[in-house]
Amino acid sequence: GPLAGASATVQGSSSDAASTVQRVGITYTGPASASGTICTSAADPANYSCTWNTLLLADGVYTVTATAYDRAGNTNAVVRSITIDNTGPVVSLHSITPVSGTSYQYISGTTVYVNGNQDGSFTMRLNAADTVSGIDRVDFPDLDGPAQIIWSPIGLSSVAASPYAVTYGWSPGAASPGAKTATIYDGSGVTTSFAFAVHVDSNAPLNATVTHTSGLSKLSSALLTFATGTDGGAGVDTS
């Protein structure tokens, strides 16, 4: 599979029934005329293993050649194509959409506010792409821990194919999850994190007032002044 990191491993085996294998050397060629040696003489030619620092190389497909040398001067080469991908996936928010309890939730960018006295659900969907090794999976977090059952789903939710989405639901009495992170893995195991937040807002706005001109009046209408007040959670709906 694809390789990544400073300690990627290239391994294999070799044998020679006559003079035995003396050594195995491993080289590579790749994008932008890159070339070099991974190792010149593996410690155990019969079952060789060499460490390759792929962080020094550009992402892409490389040709790796393992050449075995026996004690009589004969050689045999094995060629493999190996993909190097040290760049994490590109991730963005596709959408957060109410599923149920629409009037008891408010979505602002990557933050969701819900009314903890009610129940409801919403779906979060992410865009994820990796042009080199592809997307392996997206792990969406458990919002309140595996020991709790007020938020669903319970436990980590791994999604291995697009659309990369999860539907979260809550019941009355739900705690406020706060800041959370989804983790996106590409085919080489490199990750990208996506941050979002879910807050419970069960408190009504404060300090809303209605005032009017004092005293008696014979006018057919009166001037009323409204002050919407404040809300420390989802904010005041002024629509």
Image (cartoon, rainbow, N blue to C red):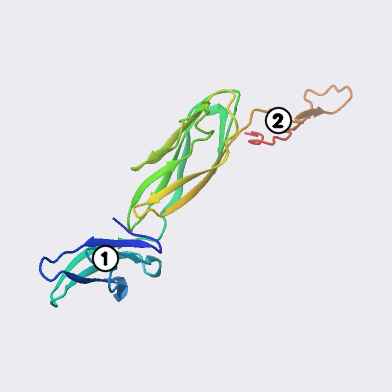
Residue kind at label 2, given as amino acid type: Pro
Q: Amino acid at mark 1?
A: Asp
- Earlier sequence position, callout 2 versus callout 1: 1
Q: Quadrant of the N terminus?
A: bottom left
Residue extending farthest bottom? 73
Q: Image check: 23 left or right of 183?
A: left
Q: Which mark is residue 137?
A: none
Residue 149 x/y as whole percent: 51, 26
Q: Disc 1 marks which residue?
A: 44
Q: Residues within 10 Å of mark 1 (few under 14, many from 20)?
A: some
Quarter of the rendering occupied by the C terminus: top right
Q: Nearer the viewer, residue 121 or 180?
A: 180
Q: Is residue 134 above or below residue 38?
A: above
| Mark 2 in CB contact with mark 1 (< 8 angstroms) | no
Corner quadrant of residue 166: top left
> Looking at this rendering, what residue extends furthest in the front direction?
19
Residue placed furthest toward the right: 215
Query: What residue is at 37 percent from the left and 66 percent from the top?
Result: 54
Q: Which residue is label 2 attached to?
A: 205
Q: Position of residue 198 (x, y in %)?
A: 56, 37
